């Protein structure tokens, strides 16, 4: 059975250009993969982390520099296999997002 996952986002002023926000892992599990794609795109783009992971309690600045002029993105979070947390998805306006925090 997967754990309950709550996600909190905070707003920041909109900026032109690259979309940047801080991703905070406030769970007790390792976040192994993070995907983002504009809303309406049917496939996930590359794992933003690559070979990296986001350990419990860590944060990372994420920059999406895909050259698109859209703000609404779907996001997918995948945790380590030994985690009780299920893969979760969410949509956010990344032009307005200052930080995004994942909680159990």
Image (cartoon, grey):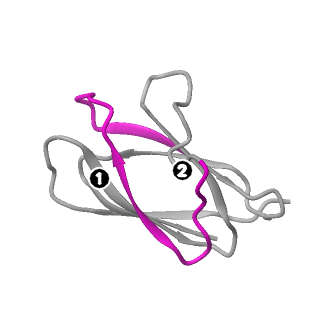
Q: Which residues are magenta?
A: 51-76
Quadrant into which the C terminus falls: bottom right
- Residue 37, how many percent across, how many down? 45, 33
Category of crowding for the residue at label 2, using alpha-carbon neighbours closer than 10 angstroms: few (below 14), some (14–19), many (at least 20): some
Q: Name the quadrant containing residue 47.
A: top right
Residue drawn at (67%, 66%) of the image: 30
Q: Find numbered disc 2 in the image and state the secondary structure of the residue it sits on.
A: loop
State left or right for residue 63 relative to residue 78. left
Q: Which mark is residue 49?
A: 2
Question: N-terminal of the two: label 2 or label 1?
Answer: 1
Residue 25, image x and y in percent? 54, 69
Determine which residue is flagged by label 1: 20
Looking at the picture, how far across and down is residue 43, in whole percent?
56, 24
Q: Is residue 61 left or right of residue 47?
A: left
Up-down relation of residue 100 to residue 69 (above or below): below
Tell me the CA gap for discs 2 and 1.
14 Å
Task: Give the mark count.
Answer: 2
């Amino acid at each position: 059975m997967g754990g309950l996952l709550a996600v909190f986002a905070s707003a920041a002023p909109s900026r032109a250009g690259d979309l940047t926000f801080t991703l905070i892992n406030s769970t007790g599990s390792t976040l192994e993969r993070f995907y983002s794609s504009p809303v309406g795109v049917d496939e996930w783009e590359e794992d933003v982390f690559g070979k990296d992971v986001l350990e419990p309690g860590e944060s990372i600045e994420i920059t999406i520099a895909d050259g698109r002029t859209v703000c609404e993105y779907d996001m997918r979070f995948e945790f380590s296999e030994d985690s009780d947390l299920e893969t979760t998805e969410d949509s956010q306006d990344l032009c307005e997002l200052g930080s995004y925090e994942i909680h159990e």
